[in-house]
Image: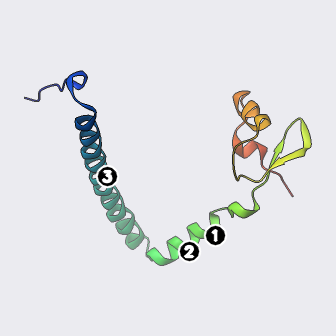
Amino acid sequence: MRMAIDTEEMSLAELQKAQQNLAEVIAKKRNAQLEEALVLVSDFLKEAELSMRDFIAFLDQKRPDPQHRVYVNPNNNEQKWKGLGRRPKWLIQAIDNGFKLEDLLEHE
């Protein structure tokens, strides 16, 4: 049976060590999940007679180039943001009002 840990009684150093240990356990579990997913994807690609290299090349083609992303204020087309640095207030307000980031992409 697992015992609950009383974090209120732990020192700052003990809490930081526990945090570090927890981060390591989480990373190991995430890597294990990724390994399992890789096996599943690999098996699926073999069954479909596709190579991992071709699949990755296909994904790279589908990935938008972040250097060409420009977001436009829906209320003022002259206000734009290239996705670098802090988000402008108009962008935060637009998202708060229900817009998705993708909705604000500039279309050529």
User: Which SS class for mark 3?
Assistant: helix
At 34% from the left and 67% from the top, the residue drawn is 43
Residue 23: percent from left, percent from top:
31, 46
Of 75 and 90, the residue lying toward us? 90
Cα separation, mark 3 vs mark 1, equals 29 Å
Q: CA distance from mark 2 to mark 3?
A: 27 Å
Q: Secondary structure at mark 1?
A: helix
Left or right, residue 10 beside residue 63: left
Return the disc, 3 or 1, that comes first in the chain's sequence.
Answer: 3
Q: Are marks 2 and 1 in contact (CB under 8 Å)?
A: yes
| Secondary structure type for disc 2 | helix
| Residue type at the position of mark 3 | Ala
Residue furthest out toward the left: 1
* Residue 85 place in picture, x, y as percent: 69, 50
**Marker disc for residue 57:** 2
What kind of colouring is applied to the model shown? Answer: rainbow
Q: Which residue sits at x=91%, y=39%?
A: 76
Q: Tell me the crowding category of disc 3: few under 14, some 14 to 19, or many 20 or more residues within 10 angstroms, Cα based.
A: few
Name the residue rendered at 63%, 64% in the picture: 62
- Coordinates of residue 44 in the picture (x, y in percent): 39, 65
Please indicate, yes or no, whether residue 50 appears anywhere in the rendered image.
no
Single out the mark in the foreground, 2 or 3: 3
- Using the image, determine if residue 67 lies above or below residue 2: below
Q: Amino acid at mark 2?
A: Ala
Lateral position of residue 37 relative to residue 53, left or right: left
- Which residue in the protein does label 3 denote? 27
Q: Quadrant of residue 33?
A: bottom left
